[in-house]
Amino acid sequence: MNTLLDWTRALQNADGDEELLIELAGVFIDEGPEMMRQVRAAIDAQDAHELQRAAHSLKGSAHIFAASAATDAAFRLEAMGAEGNFKDAADGWSILRFEIDGLLAALKERVGGQRPDQARNEHNI
């Protein structure tokens, strides 16, 4: 099983709607880096509430794509935020960054030129 991305399971999560899944992938490709910046900022500020919130959002996005390792990494940081425990946050961040970078690369490779939003923008629709 690919822990970066399981397209078959992700398609099931999108009720079999591949166009929707491609659209969601495009949104995550666009917004994932900002979500990661929010997690990093929460760690840097030692803001437990914001870490919990930001990691929770990232976890939900990773879960859509059945990216189990990224989902697990985000969950660990979410739990750290809930507990207000930043002791292992640096390690948690490193793991999350590795997994999300991999997920973003896998999504870009998977959807390539299939993103409906790009096609509309390129044709001024």
Image (tube, rainbow, N blue to C red):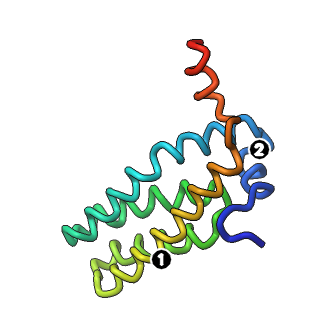
Which element is circle 1 on?
Answer: helix
Compared across the picture, whether 104 is left or right of 87 comes to: right
Q: Quadrant of residue 70?
A: bottom right
The tag on residue 60 is none
Q: Residue furthest bottom?
A: 87
74 versus 63 height, above or below: below
Quarter of image, res 63: bottom right
Badge 2 amino acid: Asp
Where residue 55 appears, as percent x and y from the top left, is: 41, 63
First in sequence: mark 1 vs mark 2? 2
52 lies left or right of 7? left
Q: Look at the image and tell me in which quarter the N terminus lies.
A: bottom right
Q: What residue type is labelled 1?
A: Ile
Q: Mark 2 points at which residue?
A: 15
Label drawn at residue 95? 1
The extreme left residue here reads 45
**Residue 32 image offset from top left, x and y in percent:** 47, 51
| Residue under the image location 40 percent in, 54 percent down | 35
Does residue 58 lie above or below 78 as drawn? above
Q: How far apart are marks 1 and 2 (CA)?
A: 30 Å
